[in-house]
Image: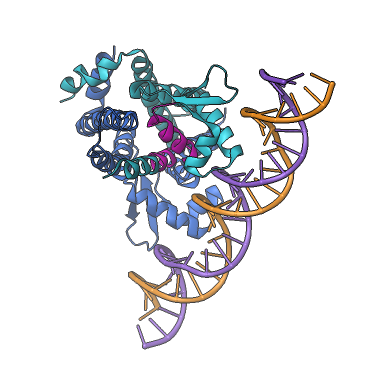
Chain colours: A cyan, B blue, C orange, D purple
Amino acid sequence: MELAEGKQKFIEAWGRIGSEWGINRTMAQVHALLLISPDALTTEEVMDELNISRGNANMTLRDLINWGLVEKQHKPGERKEYFAADKDIWNVARQVAKERKKRELEPMLKVLKELSTVEGDQNDKAYATFNKSVTDINKLANNADRMIDTMLKAEESWFWGSVLKIFK
Amino acid sequence: MELAEGKQKFIEAWGRIGSEWGINRTMAQVHALLLISPDALTTEEVMDELNISRGNANMTLRDLINWGLVEKQHKPGERKEYFAADKDIWNVARQVAKERKKRELEPMLKVLKELSTVEGDQNDKAYATFNKSVTDINKLANNADRMIDTMLKAEESWFWGSVLKIFK
DNA sequence: CTAAACTTTCAAATATTATTGAAAATAAAA
DNA sequence: TTTTATTTTCAATAATATTTGAAAGTTTAG
């Protein structure tokens, strides 16, 4: 396969994965494009490569910056803004985990905590079933939360090395 | 908080989480409803509780069955079908992981494998950058794949015990 | 200051996804 | 077989999400 074709396929695949995970397809595609670009790109270049409008490119790049996946750069003597993705995939994974934890897991934990204060009679089947599910999900979510905290602190080497052996 | 209010909040929260993860909101809500129902419910009951149409309830229940999260039951002497969710939350987590692995991770691994065969000159910056990103994502995805395999085989207690220790 | 280069905004248009509801299909009972 | 209860399908509709593009905003240079 030629590089040009590979690039296209990569952008397409990353976009598909993104939408399966609730991330806007275009955002994932812009991220993909920046991941495989050796140099930072301007808004115009992103627009041209992906055939998207200026407004879309601008908003999408801002979102990627808010996710901590892309940074704005300036070239001396130039007025245009350039955009570059963090190419360290371990950082990308951590950053995504961090944001989703903040945006989704934490609000969920708050609700579950509240729901586990609902009182009732354990002899009431409706209450007992509700309470068990809420309590169990609460435990699972807390474990996931702690796991993510640990992952966020972990070194890259962790992932590429030791864990794999332990997880046999 | 009263049980009735708690139920509503739980269904709402589970629906929200679902849509953030690319799962249809209604599907997540039906799942939530079944999780907190002590008894199996009929299509009519689901329709009434969530104010959804018969067609929607039917399709959603079928999807939940395809995800392995809900099963059809029959009561002796009755013609109606009843639906019940697997209440073991660890099973639920495993089932979701298993399905997403099959539907998303595995196709992604296939594409990445193909993309890592793209040939080129490492002195060509465009090629080198493409290749590094693809290779790194490939490694990460393979690690995730193996980790999920381990999770699928694991007992709940074992999984969290080891993971939390390992991630320290 | 004004003009030019560039970025941001957001209402309107488009595209995508979810839902309805009534008809068709199926299956058990009479 | 015919009737009745129940489930399934799917074209039409509604709801949501994304994208556009042109106007407004901002910043720098002259």
Q: Does the magenta stretch include residue A65?
A: no
Query: For this view, does A136 lie left or right of residue B163?
Result: right
Q: Position of residue B151 (x, y in %)?
A: 24, 30
The residue at the point 36 percent across, 12 percent down is: A153
Give the quarter of the figure containing the N terminus of chain B. top right
Q: What stretch is highlighted in magenta?
A: A14-39
Can see residue B74? yes
Q: In which quarter of the image is residue B154?
A: top left
Query: For this view, does B152 lie left or right of residue B80?
Result: left
| Placement of A58 over or under A97, stated as above or below | below
Q: Position of residue A128 (x, y in %)?
A: 42, 32
Give the quarter of the figure containing the C terminus of chain B. top left
The residue at the point 31 percent across, 37 percent down is: B97
Q: Quadrant of residue A136?
A: top left
- Numbered circles on residues, count: 0
Considering the whole magenta stretch, tell me its main secondary structure.
helix
Q: Does the magenta stretch include residue A29?
A: yes
Q: Which of B23 and A130 is in front in this view?
A: B23
Q: Which of B163 and D4 is in front in this view?
A: B163
Q: Position of residue B86 (x, y in %)?
A: 33, 41
The residue at the point 34 percent across, 56 percent down is: B75
| Placement of A62 over or under B70, stated as above or below | above
The residue at the point 37 percent across, 24 percent down is: A87
Query: For this view, does A163 lie left or right of residue B45?
Result: left
